[in-house]
Amino acid sequence: MFKENLYKGKTIIVTGGGTGLGKAMAGRLSELGANIAIVSRRQNVLDETALEISTKTGNTVLPVACDIRKPPEIDNMVAVVAKQFGKINGLINNAAGNFICPTEDLTPGGFKVVVDIVLNGTFNVTQAVGKHMRENDGGSILNIVTTYAWTGSGYVVPSAAAKAGVLALTRSLAVEWAKDGIRSNAIAPGPFPTEGAWSRLVPPGLGIERAMKNRVPLKRFGELHELANLVAYIMSDEAGYINGEVVTIDGGEWLKGAGEFNSLDKIPRVAWKGLKAIRKGKKKD
Ligand code: NAP
């Protein structure tokens, strides 16, 4: 689908790149020739993932421990990556925290911890890497949001509020930083089973997983390679005119909930025939 070595000589930072979707994106970009830096708090997880990816692709993956809530750690991370690879061409803001909770039971601390990672953390990394990009002829920033960034969602209110903020950040910087050669886009994934997301958001035994799958018009969850290939396109120079966009990859899930008559797909074909006959009968009256 992509030419070999599409990313040769490019350097991309992936926050939360040690696990789940971040690991899949880092792996695909490395496969396409990129130098990758994966960033999160747990050094042992990063080390394992970096070894796994670089062994498979033969390209360098640099594991850098960094808490994106802490600007001094981010400055250090950017310096380490720049020292190793030189110019940083891309940033994927993928790290996040989330948990399900009735909003009336949320404490200010619980709200803050998610917003601090998702919104403030994304801003902190964007600010530091943006400075480097401005001084080095620009780059491409991709923020991983979610479809409830614009619909909102009960039971994950801190995450919904923070992701909506990240989406606003994406669109704002797409305009403000375009003059510096920096593109800003977002991807909104629907449900992609990962250990992190499923352990926090899909407790077993409640039938949540089945209900989630049934809500998707394509009747399945997303596959990691589908997301990784979308990322590989949007981050690349081939997508150089895409700026300020949010691309949804959810099998049609959020639109299914939005369309007023979409639940009529529960009506069987035979009932539709009956309804048609009734309608025709009424016309004759
Ligand atoms: P995940 O594996 O739990 O990924 C979250 C990552 O963020 C972890 O690698 C974690 O590593 C890192 N992280 C958390 N707090 C951090 C901090 N303070 N500083 C640095 N790194 C931090 O979950 P995932 O499913 O792959 O999610 C990845 C992204 O996709 C998230 O933005 C999520 O909102 C989005 N998303 C996922 C789905 C889905 O269905 N999976 C759907 C929509 C959107 P450490 O613990 O080592 O720090």
Image: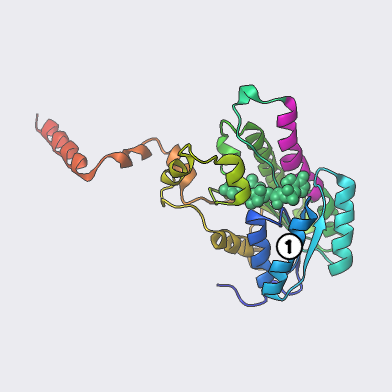
- Residue 247 position, x and y percent, is 57, 52
263 or 110: which is nearer to us?
A: 110
Residue drawn at 77 percent across, 71 percent down: 60
Q: Secondary structure at mark 1?
A: helix
Q: Is residue 123 above or below residue 43?
A: above
2 or 118: which is nearer to us?
A: 118
- Give the residues in magenta: 108-125
How packed mark 1 is, by other alpha carbons closer than 10 Å (few <14, some 14-19, many 20 or more), is few
- Residue 242 position, x and y percent, is 63, 58
- The question of residue 112 being in magenta is answered with yes
Name the dominant secondary structure of the magenta segment.
helix
Q: Is residue 12 left or right of residue 229?
A: right
Identify the image quadrant of the N terminus.
bottom right
- Residue 117 position, x and y percent, is 75, 41
Q: Quadrant of residue 85?
A: bottom right
Identify the residue under disc 1: 48
Which color scheme did the rendering employ for the protein? rainbow
- Residue 33 position, x and y percent, is 70, 73
Q: Is residue 5 left or right of residue 130?
A: left
Q: Is residue 230 above or below residue 3?
A: above
Identify the image quadrant of the C terminus.
top left
